[in-house]
């Protein structure tokens, strides 16, 4: 089996199905040796399970799914949480190893970044490992806290703020400049990355003056999700669950080694 999991925070099940699940299913459907395709669309999450014929090469089939999913990215909403995750097993399979990443000196944002960009990649390269799930992860996100009373004072609405964010916080192709002997590609940096860049966004400009985002909202860099946390022995941390491929040998050969840091990363 190969699973495709996509997260889209805040979207209801109907939006998940029409804008994510169905486009991905249409793209995946043409892959050879598919036996069944089942999908689940719930609030904020889409999961597609692709079952292949018994004689199909699981590794090659998973690569085919990854290629089709990559091609379908253009048709998905641009503000999804992250690109779809393709794994070579049922996403509901039991893990065989659970590791805790904890520190007395590092915050959860730093631990999450270390677990995702360092440890996750190393575990996924171990032979016969299908996927590695992360628990308690805190991704960095720009948090915008709107003050309704200030919006009313400036005669603005929430839609005014969201429309400016969608229009200004985007990076699109900017074309080329041609000369007699040169050809230069223009790169316009449109994605906003700092609190100040978001705070200085102009919401409205008129004869009465300029209203910026900082005038009607508080902008701060913080965790993407405050609703979930993970602890071990009372200490916050990030968990890594290692899921094997179907039929894998749980006892790894001694030649399959992987080097990791031991102890807290101070």
Image: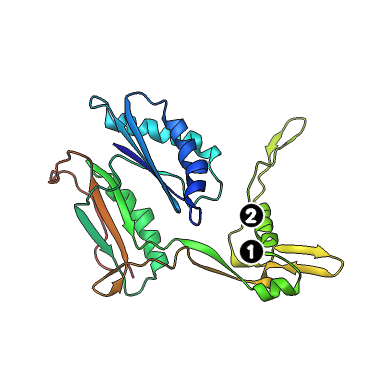
Dot 2 alpha-carbon crowd within 10 angstroms: few under 14, some 14 to 19, many 20 or more: some
**Percent coordinates x, y for residue 102 in the rendering:** 30, 68
Helix or strand or loop: what does disc 1 sit on?
Answer: helix
Cα–Cα span, label 2 and label 1: 9 Å
17, 132: nearer the viewer: 17
227, 38: nearer the viewer: 38
| Residue under the image location 23 percent in, 27 percent down | 54
**Percent coordinates x, y for residue 150 in the rendering:** 69, 75
Give the side of residue 155 with respect to residue 33, left or right.
Answer: right
| Residue under the image location 33 percent in, 49 percent down | 121
**Percent coordinates x, y for residue 188 in the rendering:** 67, 48
Query: Dot 2 corresponds to which residue?
Result: 169
- Residue 198: mark in rendering: 1
**Percent coordinates x, y for residue 193 in the rendering:** 58, 59
252, 150: nearer the viewer: 150
Dot 1 alpha-carbon crowd within 10 angstroms: few under 14, some 14 to 19, many 20 or more: many
**Can residue 127 be seen by looking at this rendering?**
no
Helix or strand or loop: what does disc 2 sit on?
Answer: loop
| Residue under the image location 38 percent in, 40 percent down | 39
If you read the primary sequence from the N terminus, does the residue marked by circle 2 or circle 1 appear first?
2
**Can residue 171 be seen by looking at this rendering?**
yes
Q: Quadrant of the C terminus?
A: bottom left
Q: Quadrant of the N terminus?
A: top left
Give the side of residue 112 with respect to residue 224, left or right.
Answer: left
Give the side of residue 61 with respect to residue 198, left or right.
Answer: left
**In contact (CB < 8 Å): disc 2 and disc 1:** yes
């Amino acid at each position: 089996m190969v699973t495709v999991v996509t997260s889209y925070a805040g979207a209801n099940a109907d939006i998940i199905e029409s804008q994510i699940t169905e486009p991905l299913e249409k793209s995946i459907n043409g892959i050879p040796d598919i036996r069944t395709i089942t999908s689940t669309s719930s609030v904020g999450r889409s999961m597609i399970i692709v079952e292949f014929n018994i004689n199909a090469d699981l590794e090659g089939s998973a690569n085919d799914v990854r290629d089709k999913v990559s091609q379908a990215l253009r048709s998905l909403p641009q503000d999804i949480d992250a690109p779809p995750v393709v794994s070579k097993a049922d996403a509901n399979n039991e893990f065989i190893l659970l590791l805790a990443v904890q520190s007395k000196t590092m915050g959860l944002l730093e631990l999450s970044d270390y677990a995702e960009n360092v440890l996750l990649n190393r575990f996924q390269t171990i032979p016969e490992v299908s996927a590695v799930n992360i628990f308690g992860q805190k991704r960095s996100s720009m948090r915008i806290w709107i003050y309704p009373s200030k919006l009313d004072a400036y005669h603005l609405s929430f839609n005014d703020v969201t429309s400016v964010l969608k229009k200004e916080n985007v990076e699109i192709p900017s074309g080329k400049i041609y000369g007699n002997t040169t050809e230069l590609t223009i790169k316009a940096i449109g994605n906003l990355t700092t609190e100040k860049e978001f705070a200085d966004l102009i919401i409205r400009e008129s004869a009465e003056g300029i209203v910026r985002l900082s005038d009607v909202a508080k902008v701060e860099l913080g965790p993407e999700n405050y609703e979930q946390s993970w602890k071990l022995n009372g200490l916050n941390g990030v968990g890594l669950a290692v899921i094997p491929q179907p039929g894998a040998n749980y006892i790894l050969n001694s030649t399959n080694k992987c080097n990791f840091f031991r102890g807290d990363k101070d």
